[in-house]
Image: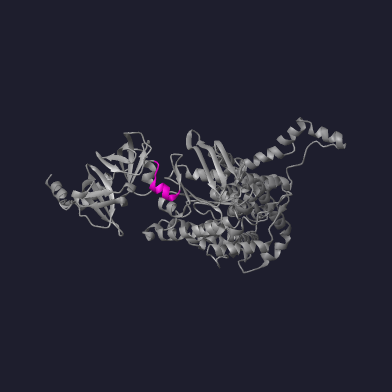
Amino acid sequence: MSKELIRLANCTMAFDDEVVLDNINLYINDKEFLTLLGPSGCGKTTTLRIIGGFQTPTSGDVFFDGVRINAVPPHKRAINTVFQKYALFPHLNVYENIAFGLRIPKTDEKGKKVKLPEEEIHQRVMEMLEVVNLKGFDKRHITQLSGGQQQRVAIARALVNKPKVLLLDEPLGALDLKLRKDMQNELKRIQKAMEITFIYVTHDQEEALAMSDTVVVMDAGKIQQIGTPEDIYNEPKNAFVADFIGESNIIDGIMRADGVVEIFNRKFRCLDGGFERDEPVDVVIRPEDVDIVPEDQGQLKGTVTNVTFKGMQYDIIVDFYGFKWLIQTTDLSPVGSRIGIKIDPDGIHVMKKSHYSGMFGDYSSYSEEYEEISDASFDPDEDQEGGDEE
Amino acid sequence: MKNKLSLFAVPYVVWMALFVVAPIVMVVVYAFSTADGGFSLSNFARMGTYAVIFTRSFKLALIATAICLLVGYPVAYMMAKEGPGFQRIASVLIMLPMWVNFLLRTYSWMSILEKNGLLNQLFSAIGLFDLINSVFGTNIQYFKMIGTSGAVVLGMVYNYLPFMILPIYSVIIKLDNSLLEAARDLGANSAGVFRKVILPLSLPGVLSGITMVFVPSVSTFAISRLLGGGTQMMLGDLIEQQFLGGAYNPHLGSAIALVMMVIVVVCMWVMNHFGEGEEQAVML
């Protein structure tokens, strides 16, 4: 069974008076792929830099394998980093970049400086080049590599030191979509093959869900939720997490009893419980969990105001009593048609109210942008004619 | 668009042709001829006579450049590592002497270094000479500083140090901090980060610093005359004499200037060739 490797205990980080991290508590297991996910400025990179040793928390402790490492400098931690813009050494070729860490003399138990023999360095660099699929690139200059290749060199340069933990700071941010998908699989494969802990920072929720064992959702210097990708997606803790991870309709509801939630004055069966009677709650309904039925059979009835073709499905915006929902469906319901919807109990997720309530969830701004364009009666020339008359 | 803009370069091209290319051609022509106007290598044949001066010029310029590098690099490094406030003050302090006329600065050093100059007066006032005399049984009344090669080197270092500091500083300040973090992350301590990352990546600055100090040092003339007290004649003085002094002989002067130029160009070429790899890496 996996054991705890890193623990952040009550870590707070403040620059001047600005609190960047607010009392973070987090533990990371050995051989785990953990992702710190959140919008920019949420504190995820600061958390990573604290683990890497580039920053010391203003208060709180960092433990590695049970030992407090607050004061241990980066070069004495069994942790290596893949930097956001790779930070490859421009004066060294691919081979020497990867060998950089191996060429630094290590101190053995007796306090003696030991240098790795050249044959071992060569062997390990060549092995690493194979792991990251860059065989034959060893003599290349860094500037002769594409973004994806530089990325691989950065990973190889970190992994060749056999760290217990690899930190990755938005490593795929600079790559195009196709390459990013390839590298996601590649990273996952490398992590499995090397059997080490990856701590990954990203703002891309899809990336986080696809790669991670554990996702830590952060916002405003606080951890909002820790869980498996499935937990985070299916059981978001608050409106922020629900909104940040995937598309979601977040509606005000009232919990009438365990398993019964009221939305728009209609009672729906759900699987959640443990709330006060008549407690106001946030209700999350994912766009793909809504079934479209004929209007007279629907639990709720609304009007389609916008349709966008997305390839695999249509994104339609439906107006229910002035509140606009996003629904994903494979059947076309034209703009202006009346539809009914049904939601299964497991498609409804109830959350406690938080200070994020009311900030997310309505798709009216989304639909209005499109309404003008899709409105058949809207004539762009009309405005111009009006202008001429003045 | 491009052609229109390049019109603005015409004045400079004309300027270069008139005042850089033409004089060099004249120097070459003069160097390979004699007063009667005929082609001759006799000017170069006399070069052996001045071997001492050539050697001294290059030796003192090398020493001055080495001292500038040893003093300037740490200053440049420190400046780049400190905050912007310190950087502003340091830059002003480094530039400040350059706002004072070059000859004035050198004359000031004369009055500091001479027999009854400020330094000797200070040493005398604090009883340094008495102390030395009583310990060693000597009878020293002053240190001879002016008229030594040391004074000339000091003058060159003082005058050309900013040209070493500034290019090194501007390279170090532009180094990407994530490279230094990456080196630390990979296990390098502070000394390792400096030796394996900062130093190699700052070489282009070092090279241009060396060039900017060495070239004016090797051809300097006023410093050696004023602080060398006539005993430390350098190439610049020798050339000056051929054009302005009693030994009037512009043909010989041109030949000396030409030989010096060739040696300097060769030195620079070798050095730049040596550091080409790093320079390219940084430029890219």
The location of residue A359, given as percent across then percent down, is 33, 39
Left or right of B203 in this view: A228: left
Left or right of A358 in this view: A33: right
Between B272 and A166, which is closer to the camera in this rendering?
Answer: A166
Q: Is residue A290 visible?
A: yes
Q: Main secondary structure of the magenta part?
A: helix
Between A189 and A39, which is closer to the camera in this rendering?
Answer: A189
Residue with the most extreme bottom position: B39
Q: Is residue B265 magenta?
A: no
The location of residue A146, given as percent across then percent down, is 48, 62
The location of residue A319, given as percent across then percent down, is 23, 46
Between A28 and A13, which is closer to the camera in this rendering?
Answer: A28
Residue B33 occupies quadrant = bottom right
Q: Quadrant of the C terminus of chain A?
A: top left
Residue with the most extreme right position: B137
Residue A271 occupies quadrant = top left
Say above or below: B110 vs A84: above
Q: Is residue B255 visible?
A: no
Say above or below: B9 vs B111: below
Number of marks drawn: 0
Magenta-drawn segment? A228-237
Left or right of B78 in this view: A321: left
Residue B266 occupies quadrant = bottom right
